[in-house]
Amino acid sequence: MKILVTGGAGFIGSAVCRHLIADTDHSVVNLDKLTYAASLASLAAIEADPRYRFAKGDICDRAFVLQLLEAEQPDAIMHLAAESHVDRSIDGPGDFIRTNILGTYELLEAARAYWQRLPDARRAAFRFHHVSTDEVYGDLPLDGGLFTEDTPYAPSSPYSASKASSDHLAMAWHHTYHLPVVLSNCSNNYGPFHFPEKLIPLMILNGLEGKALPVYGRGENVRDWLYVDDHARALALVATKGEPGRSYNIGGRNERSNLGVVETICDTLDRLAARPGAGPRRELIRFVTDRPGHDLRYAIDATRIETELGWRAEETFETGLERTVRWFLANEAWWRPIRAERYAGTRLGAAPAP
Ligand code: NAD
């Protein structure tokens, strides 16, 4: 198959491109606008592969996307391009509305026009895979419950509301125009090539440099963490084997409080990157004013993708985190320039010095 991946220079999109080229026979066209969150360096391992091609462009530009589809003739689209950082959506929601809602609409319309002109056999096999988040479901109480595919949508932040809108648009294009749409909703990802403003890389890098480790509120909010390569494998399965009109929840069954995550990072760093003469890194933790509208707990029931598509997460939180910390320790050349030049200092970045 030839697969058009949107947002393939981002954190998860680059993991998807690397997985498709390294572990399958599929070809990839990576369509990305190269926003602040993108890094072509994350694709260095596959950029010379003849099955991989990069196209710079904006999903909001329907004419450009349609031209690319007609020229490349993909068999599927995996749509990951988005504005993805909740804190940035609170400070400036406009880009989230534009890319996540209007951009998905333009992409769906370009895909529909392209798909309608395909010969019958290719039309039937075509897939539009819309990649989304568990944050569309709102939050859960600390003491129980899981998100299933039937949980009603109740997004809280501008980010999750924009993703919920795009999920509804994608499913509407299936119900109304019969575009073969599959949808997936995943929990929080972490792993190599993670943009340094997100919680886990921020804590690893601040901890490494002996800087404050800012934690929202009392750190009680709970997230279900999934190693990014496990997500990339799940996405490839959904895109190629998923049933049109169906959605799939993806999660690692790895619930951790934010404070628990930061403490585990501190202990892992103390073991792998000792600081002679300095105290344990847990002493760097600082509680800061909570994020407005901060969802309490997310947790995923991944039974459907496990039973119907045979997917299972390979990493536990402990093994995945150890891999991630080791990767950041070994790949300063990747994160140092991003941290120095492009990390804009969002809410967590503005934390007090230790
Ligand atoms: P990211 O911010 O790291 O990457 C997004 C990519 O999209 C960037 O390369 C950026 O340049 C590109 N992009 C942005 N606007 C674009 C536009 N208008 N046209 C073309 N390209 C554009 O995001 P991520 O963390 O890799 O997330 C990818 C997808 O997965 C998103 O749809 C996100 O909602 C979803 N998701 C993320 C997580 C997570 O934990 N990060 C969890 C579940 C779902």
Image: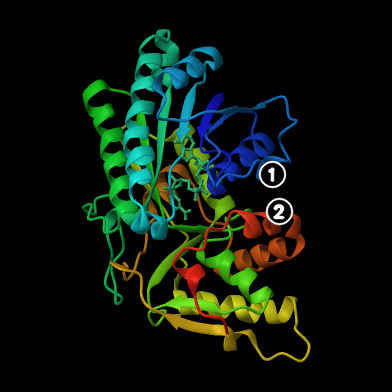
**Residue 19 in the image: x percent, y percent?**
63, 41
Which residue is more in the foreground, 349 or 82? 349
In the rendering, which numbered label is found on residue 41?
A: 1
Q: Which residue is drawn at 76% across and 61% down?
A: 330
Q: Left or right? Give the position of 333 relative to 246.
A: right
Quadrant in which the C terminus appears: bottom right
Q: The residue under label 1 is which amino acid type? A: Ala
Look at the image and tell me whether residue 50 can be seen. yes
Q: Of the numbered discs in the image, which one, if any, rests on residue 299? A: none
Circle nearer the N terminus (1, 2): 1
Q: Where is residue 292 in the image (x, y as percent from the top left)?
A: 30, 68
Give the amino acid type for the residue marked by disc 2 in the picture.
Answer: Trp
- Which disc number belongs to residue 334? 2
Label 2: few (<14), some or many (≥20) within 10 Å?
Answer: some
Q: Do the residues labelled 1 and 2 touch (CB within 8 Å)?
A: yes
Look at the picture and state if 150 lies above or below 263. above
What colouring style does the render use?
rainbow
**Would you call the spot at circle 1 few (<14 residues within 10 Å), some (14-19), or many (20 or more)?**
few
